[in-house]
Amino acid sequence: MKILVAIKRVPDAETTIKVNPEGTGIVNAGVKWVVNPFCEIAIEEALKIKETKGDVEVVLVTVGRSESQEQLRTGLAMGADRAILVTAENLDTTGVSRVLAKIVEKESPDVVFLGKQAIDDDSNEVGQMLAQRLGWAQACYISEFNMADDAKSAQVVREIDGGMRTDKVMLPAIITADLRLNEPRYASLPGIMKARKKPLEEIDGASLGVDLEPKIIIKSMAPPPARAAGRLVESVDELINALKNEAKVL
Amino acid sequence: MIDFELDEEQQLIKETVTAFAADVVRPAAHDADETGVIPEGLVAQAWELGIIQNSIPEEYGGYGSTPSTVTGTIVAEGLAEGDLGIALHLLSARLVVDAVMHAGSDEQKKEVLPLYCTDKFVSGSAAVLEPQWNFSLSELQTSAKRDGNDYVISGTKCYVPLAKTSPYMVVFARGEEEPIEAFLLKAGTPGVEIGEREGLMGIKACETYPVAINDVRVPASAKLPGSARGLLRRSRVAQSAMAVGVAKASLDYAIEYAKEREAFGVKIAQKQAIAFMLADMAIDVDAARLLNWEAAWSVEHNEDPSREITLARSYTDNAVMTVTDNGVQVLGGHGFIREHPVEMWARNGRGFSVFEGMASV
């Protein structure tokens, strides 16, 4: 069996993000880059299947700058078998989903795991778009994944508004991981040493023959306005008055 | 010639260890300090990181990587940044594993190393320090005398970590041929008397014991044939790295606090008295780390690295005291309360300059 896990390089959640003076993007200098946390969960789920099912190859793929191989190495150190880096810059979600569809065609995995969304632009689109392009089933925001013994289907629990929903999904399928699916492991030291020797293939995005032109153009980027400081009020009356007349929420 | 950038592997190791230290070790530090007990689950999880097994050759059941001494300092600093007492406990296996790997005979390697390659945590112990007036390593009072095919070892040791639970203890003694010799003693060797757990000022999470060695007779094969002095050098570098980790913890905590805490309408980080203090702390941490990296590098590249090690050790021992003391000061009255970890780091950091005295090995 083969599992493909698509991952993304994103700024660490604790990094302070600054918008560049031109307002076209963020300042890259001084940013600590990590594997998108939801993608880490996706990797972990694939590795857990590998551990329980045995004969499973876990292949990682990412689309981005050549620096993204740092994140692929992290995934390899966690235990994935090999990795593919498609080099391309300034893609939007449509471009990424086109590239991934090509890679899926090439690799023909039995299941594809992704994080439900990346914590940088929070688009939450790539998994769904990819399923549409491939004509595959999709199960998004899953918090539980159980593959049937014959590996032809899987039972998933999805987090939906107001509760959980259990679905059976036919494989191959696109699965996107939610926060509670699992707790990703730390890469072990032996895993890190082994990762160096694992294959990492680099493919030029332009060579795939797909439209990489972004359909979404970022017009401008700006930090959120600073919040005004809070204020202590003397009495309940004053509070109600402020909520009514200043905040206008009552 | 000069490159301060970690390689990709070291970078990943650093990320793994610092993440583990921040997510798992640090949250357990306060309670471990109060109760003197380290949760078993934490120890098991740490063992899965493969820190010890990684460097043991494949023929003995390990993973056969040969991480450099510099990489070793990255691991030690990272774990100690989480908590020093817990880090000492987790890395205790190294006291035995490193001793056997660097100074042991083939027989000793075959006997000992596989024991440390299972999936269960195994601790290690080393009896180095002695309750003499200067705790000097260069004038050990514990003696090892050759008697036929045996050695007879006698003396008194203190600060012996995990003496009660470790399958092996490396005992350092003044030999007849060398001023410092090392012996591998099995748990339960007759004549080795382990006292009551010591009550310490810091590193309360880590068990240490006084050990009396009363005319203990061991076969000549218990002696580690390699350089005992070399082992102490490595351990001093590892300890310096942990001192840097403790200082770093205090520095980062103080910075975050100073950026949040307001006095007279501004964040205290904007007050010069605090800002200068934080800057000095940062300089101390970086300088200590760089000196220690040089010392670690020298262990592998220089015939005699004692100058580099002594300079690094002397600087870090002082730096960790100054930095953790300032950490308490930045928090002011709040720093004296046990709810904040800075007082614990000040106690933990205080030990380094007394652990190994000022002796130059």
Image (cartoon, helix red, strand yellow):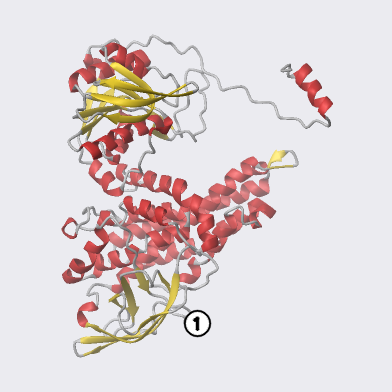
Q: Is residue A247 above or below residue A192?
A: above
State left or right for residue B108 relative to residue A32: left
* Residue A249 found in image quarter: top right
- Residue B283 visible in image: no
Mark 1 is surrounded, within 10 Å at the Cα level, by few (under 14), some (14 to 19) or many (20 or more) other residues, namely: few
Residue at 32% in and 54% down: B51
Horizontal placement of B271 versus B175: left or right? right
Q: Is residue B189 above or below residue A20?
A: below
Q: Is residue A121 above or below residue B205?
A: above
Q: Position of residue B333 (x, y in %)?
A: 69, 54
- Asked where in the image residue A71 lies, by quadrant, the reply is top left
Amino acid type at image mark 1: Trp
The spot of residue A46 in percent (x, y) is: 28, 33
Q: Residue at x 80, y 30 (%)?
A: A233
One can see residue B238 in this view: yes
Image location (x, y in percent) of residue B307 = 38, 67
Looking at the picture, tell me which residue is in the foreground, A27 or A214.
A214
Looking at the image, the residue that sits furthest to the bottom is B147
Residue in the foreground of this view, choosing between B205 and B299:
B205
Circle 1 residue = B133
Q: Residue at x 26, y 56 (%)?
A: B55
Q: Chain of mark 1?
A: B
Q: Is residue B116 left or right of residue B250?
A: left
Q: What is the secondary structure assignment of the residue under circle 1?
A: loop
